[in-house]
Image (cartoon, rainbow, N blue to C red):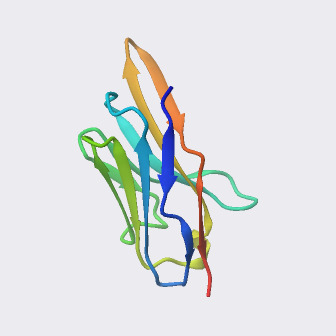
């Protein structure tokens, strides 16, 4: 069973930075897509950033220029560097990963890590 374990969340002041990490428990799997989502209280879960196996990336408009998603395939780990944080970035951040084999899609979610941006 694959598990995704996030770390790096916490409390930070506006304008500050955090770096989230998400490591998969089985490094023998080569994930196709890895991503970060977030969910603020009373809101739906939204995509923050996504990175494909070819290293192409895409971001939500609200974080472009401030957040950077990267991955280390050897470690099956995805990162989210968050700079110039704003109070509206406060949310639970979830890691996502998937791969496809024999036509079947397998997708996984982390347990979430809280990010709070407040003075």
Locate residue 42 relative to residue 34 in the image: left or right: right
> Which residue is at the far front?
25
Q: Relative to 4, does residue 78 appear above or below in the rendering?
A: below
Residue 41 location in percent, x, y? 73, 61
> Which residue is at the far top?
102
Which residue is painted at 61% across and 69% down in the image? 90
Which residue is painted at 30% across and 49% down in the image? 71
The residue lying toward the viewer, choosing from 46 and 92, is 92
Tag count: 0
Residue 56 location in percent, x, y? 27, 47
> Which residue is at the far right?
42
Q: Relative to 11, does residue 6 appear above or below in the rendering?
A: above
Locate residue 75 relative to residue 110 in the image: left or right: left
Q: Relative to 16, does residue 33 appear above or below in the rendering?
A: above
Residue 54 location in percent, x, y? 23, 40
Say which quadrant the C terminus sits in.
bottom right
> Which residue is at the far bottom?
119
Locate residue 1 relative to residue 59 in the image: left or right: right
Q: Relative to 76, does residue 70 appear above or below in the rendering?
A: below
Residue 29 location in percent, x, y? 34, 28
Quarter where residue 81 is shown: bottom left
Quarter where residue 13 is shown: bottom right
Which residue is painted at 24% across and 41% down in the image? 74
Which residue is painted at 49% across and 41% down in the image? 4
């Amino acid at each position: 069973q694959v598990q995704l374990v996030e770390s790096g969340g916490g409390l930070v002041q506006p304008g500050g930075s955090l770096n989230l990490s998400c490591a998969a428990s089985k490094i023998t799997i080569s994930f196709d897509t890895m991503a970060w989502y977030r969910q603020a209280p009373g809101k739906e879960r939204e995509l923050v950033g996504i990175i494909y196996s070819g290293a192409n990336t895409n971001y939500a408009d609200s974080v472009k220029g401030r957040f950077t998603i990267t991955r280390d395939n050897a470690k099956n780990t995805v990162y989210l560097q968050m700079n110039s944080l704003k109070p509206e970035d406060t949310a639970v951040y979830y890691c996502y990963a998937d791969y496809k084999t024999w036509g079947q899609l397998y997708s996984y979610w982390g347990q979430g890590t809280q990010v709070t941006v407040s003075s």
